Amino acid sequence: MSSKVEKQIVVDVPLSTAYNQWTQFEDFPQFMGGVESVTQLSDDRLKWVAHIAGVRREWEATIVEQVPDRRIEWASTDGATNSGAVEFSDAGGNKTQLSLTLEYQPEGMVEKVGDLLHLVARQAEHDLKQFKEFIEHEGHATGAWRESVPTGEPSAYNRYTHPFDQTGALVDLEGESDGTTDGEIRSAAERNVHKPDDGGTIPPLGGNLGDR
């Protein structure tokens, strides 16, 4: 059973400043309690190391949506199961409202007890207050990344937006499975591409399909 936390805060900086700072993911440990490190592996992939209810966890996350000055959404692709989003809105007077949503799956009795005590909710509230203090003290963002994710034409379905897929996207979540093992790990379109032609031959062990 998953748990969901929603928190909001108003920070006394312009919208673009608040957004730009949040895109500096590797700065998260400066204001997020329990976060040991965040490493940006690519434009849309992050590696997290954090302590959740006293337990050290590592996971990778994919940024599934990023709209400048509006929204950043992410979901874990392996390791600790979680997802989240932060939305930015103009609060007037050069102030910005941040709306943070976290969704996670408790693992083991320690984290379930922590869930009952609302530890994650309190941590999220604390982190937002720390972010407010951090950005208001700085007065400007330490950096900025203004690109959108996804870029180009968005796909109709992104399996990583399912926050609790522990299979690493190996299960057919689109109802296309034909009941075979191959059908569980490939979409219908992929199965058609990989389907051998009738009468096709298989090269002998150690042989080649043709001379080069």
Image (cartoon, rainbow, N blue to C red):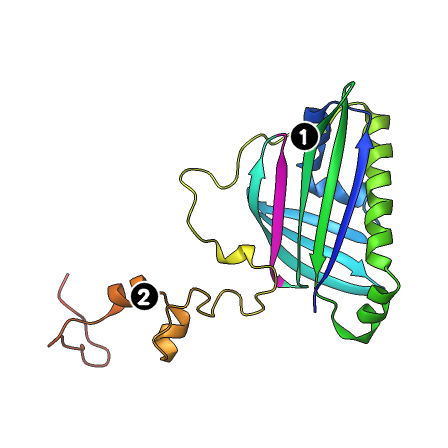
Residue at point 15% right, 71% down? 197
Quarter of the picture holding the C terminus = bottom left
Give neighbour class at mark 2: few <14, some 14-19, many 20+ (Cα, 10 Å): some
Rendered location of residue 122, percent (x, y): 87, 52
Magenta-drawn segment: 69-78
Give neighbour class at mark 1: few <14, some 14-19, many 20+ (Cα, 10 Å): some
The kind of secondary structure element at disc 1 is: helix
Label placed on residue 188 = 2
Q: Is residue 188 above or below residue 86?
A: below
Quarter of the picture holding the N terminus = bottom right
Report the amino acid beneath label 1: Asn
Q: Which residue is mark 1?
A: 20
Residue at point 43% right, 64% down? 174
Left or right of 199? Residue 126 is right
Q: Is residue 110 magenta?
A: no
Q: Is residue 121 above or below residue 130?
A: below
